[in-house]
Amino acid sequence: MAAGKKEGKTAARRVAPEDVLPGVDEARAAFSGALGPELARQRGFLQAMREEPPQLLHLEGGDASSRVALALWWAALLNCEEQGDEPCLRCHSCLSIGARMHPDLFLLDGRAGSIKIDDVRGLRPVMGEKPHFARRRVIVLAEAQSLGVEAANSLLKVLEDPSPDTCFVFTAPQRERLLPTLVSRGWVITLPWPETGRALPEAMRVWEKALAQFATEGRGWFDLSQSRNGLDAATAQQVALVGQKALADCLAGRESGALAALFRPLPEESLLELSDIFVECQDALIAQVNPLLALDAMATGVYRVVREGRGRSRRSS
């Protein structure tokens, strides 16, 4: 379950009868990212595993919201009171899981920052207990690539002593972002990769335009970034993804925005440098570097690589 500000990430709270659960429509919104037809195949895999669920399940691909939504859907499937082929999303168990209020659901949310060793250690006291109300306790590590090395090793020790009533779910963009020893202990389900050629949301087009202008003219970026003081890490990660998307569109030869057009004439070594810059920005955000500092470093790196890449192209022509 998700913890409040005064609770640790793994704090458990019993759902008392007087607690007000969300309505069916509101609860379904928590699962909406898992309900589309594009994930029918993945939901089918999970249905087939329900009777004998793996101790550890990896969900990769898709985007962060769809991965977490499918993890919650899996928790609901394992514990739905109607025990149908799919979770009903209206019983008390499904509603409390959708609201992240269920006492047997734990969420360590790497989208909010790195998952630390103390967060993992906080799981140990509950591992020896039976679930309070559910058939299965479900522990979700959202964006598990944010696990620190110490936390990952501590988690390995937890997994070495399996509990038949507990299921872990790791979500990550790619399994390669996790320790191989963690990946080898679980089943992997891959969600459809996002369509890189689709249009950016309006809020992200502003950042794309600013980054393209800065990489070309050396101006405009800091005016935008400083005006967004207080930007959170999740939004900053979306900005970094704008650069990764532009690079993917460039490499695939797709018509896209100004940023992809700017990258297209650059030599291959420059494109590889750009890829490293965007990944480094994502890693910095996961490590809880100030989001604006991480984005400004990314923009400065892009500016440098574009200028140097243009110079290489002129010299080779």
Image (cartoon, helix red, strand yellow):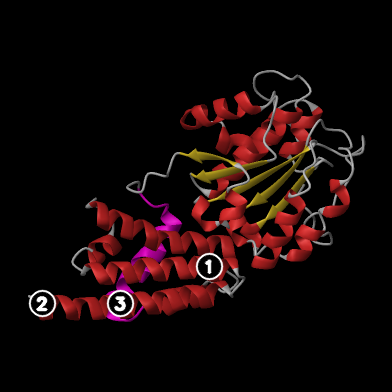
Q: Which mark is residue 305?
A: 3
Name which residue lies at 48% across and 59% down: 238
Three-letter amino acid code at disc 3?
Answer: Val
- Quadrant of the image occupied by residue 202: bottom left
Which of disc 3 and disc 1 is earlier in sequence?
A: 1
Vertical placement of residue 282 versus 175, above or below? below
Residue in view at x 78 percent, y 64 percent = 118
- Proximity of marks 1 and 3: CB atoms separated by less than 8 Å: no
Residue furthest out toward the left = 317
| SS class, disc 2 | helix
Read off the magenta span.
199-220
Determine which residue is flagged by label 2. Answer: 316
Q: Which residue is mark 1?
A: 283
Q: Residues within 10 Å of mark 3 (few under 14, many from 20)?
A: many
Task: Work out whether residue 265 or residue 136 is closer to the camera in this orientation and state it.
Answer: 136
Q: Is residue 147 above or below residue 159?
A: below
Q: How many marks?
A: 3
> Does 225 sit left or right of 34 as displayed?
left
Q: Give amino acid for label 2.
A: Ser
Query: What residue is shown at x 37% (from left), y 44% (from top)?
Result: 195
Looking at the rendered structure, the secondary structure element under dot 1 is helix
Q: CA distance from mark 2 to mark 3?
A: 16 Å
Q: Is residue 42 above or below residue 279?
A: above
